[in-house]
Structure formats: structure tokens, C-alpha cells
Amino acid sequence: MIDQTAIVTDSISENEIISRILLGEKNLYAGIMRKYNQRLYRVGMSIIKDESEVEDVMQVTYIKAYENLGKFQFKSGFSTWITKILINESLLRLKKRKQLLHINDDSAQNQIQHQPVDFQTPLMKVINSELKQILEDAILNLPEKYRAVFIMREIENMNVSETQECLDLSETNVKVRLNRAKAMLKNSLADYYKKEDILNFHLSRCDRIVENVMKRI
């Protein structure tokens, strides 16, 4: 079955799509979500490192973006605008999580903080799934401030300007953190990772996000 919404959103500019959504063509918002699901998932994972929580944050982000679409000034790119919303929501979720951990005793807190990330859900068929797992673990184990810059610049191909705007960093800090992130990853892995396979947002999950948000807006 042909997705007519996808055809429409591929044939007109993003600003025009947003303008038409504001005029009442709510169905076009599904195309916007499908376009940014992969990016928002990866950026969210760079902060939260929990798949189910990231999906929830993505839905909150899309709903907030839709509800505040009239405030979008068309001055910066929509991609930057919605990514910043996701980052703020992710940091808020992380802050709440840390507050919950704080009220637990030390042993319980230690168990939660050191719980390994579970990537048993298949992300994508790749030639060497074990290597892919090692790469994902290595990236997700980077300190947050380096991990976010690495994923945005190296995996999502966001330019320096957009990355610094999303993270409120200087151009120099973006470059320094990226270089530091690369240095922290093992040199033996550097030539093997394929960015399109890392933290891939499976189509079924994309459909779930779109369906849930469209029901709520």
C-alpha cells in the first residue's frame, strides 16, 4: 500500500508542510515524524540509554512540538528546533531518574546505576552482529557529554553549527568533545563501524510512535 502522506511530504518543502499543518492538515505531521524518528531516537539514546524511555520521550517531544508549532519562527531549521525539544525532555527525564535513585539506599542505587544496557532486541541484520554489539556498547559507554556529540556528528551527520545550537556549546567545544570521544573509542574499532547500523530505529517502532502520537494530537 502506497503511503500518500510520504509522497506529499517528499514533494514539498518542510516549511510548506509545517504551514499546511498549521492550517489544519494534521495528517502531514505523520510524515514529519517518520522523517525525524531515527535522529531523535539516536540523540535520545545518547542521553538516556534506555530504549523504552527514549520512545516515551520521543512521543512527548512530538506532542509538545505539535502543540507549540505556532511558536516555530522559521528562523532556524525545524530539525534543530525539534531536536532541542527532545534534548530538553531527555535531560528532564534523566534528572527525574537521578532524583529517584537518590532516595534509595546505596546498594540499591549501585545496582541500578550499573545495570547493563540490554540490546537483545534485533536492530538490523548485519554481517557481524557481535561486532555491532561491541560498537554500540562502546559508544553508549562514553561519558554523556562526549557520547551526545559523537552520535550527532558522526552517526547522524549533523553539522557543527546545528550540533552546537542543539547542545548550547561553542564551535570549539563541539570539535574538542568529538575528538575526545574518538580518542576514547578503541582504535581497533574505528575502521569497522557502519553508522547506518548503529542504534537503528526499526520500522515497526517507527509505526508505533507515529500511531500513538497521531491518536493524541
Image: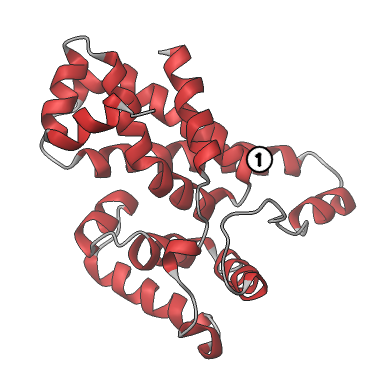
Give whichever of 160, 35 is nearer the camera: 35
**Quick check: 193 above or below 49?**
below
Give whichever of 120, 154 is nearer the camera: 120
At 28% from the left and 25% from the top, the residue drawn is 5
| Quarter location, residue 3 | top left
The quadrant the C terminus occupies is top left
Q: Is residue 129 left or right of residue 194?
A: right
**Quick check: 196 above or below 45?**
below
At 22% from the left and 38% from the top, the residue drawn is 78
Q: Position of residue 129 (x, y in %)?
A: 64, 69
At 81% from the left and 50% from the top, the residue drawn is 109
Q: Look at the numbered disc 1 and give the secondary structure of its residue.
A: helix
Q: Position of residue 77 (x, y in %)?
A: 18, 42
The residue to which callout 1 is attached is 97
Q: Position of residue 84 (x, y in %)?
A: 34, 42
Q: Is residue 65 left or right of residue 12?
A: right
Q: Is residue 92 visible?
A: no
The quadrant the N terminus occupies is top left
Q: Residue furthest front?
A: 1
User: Crowding near pointer 1: few (<14 within 10 Å), some, many (20+)?
Assistant: few
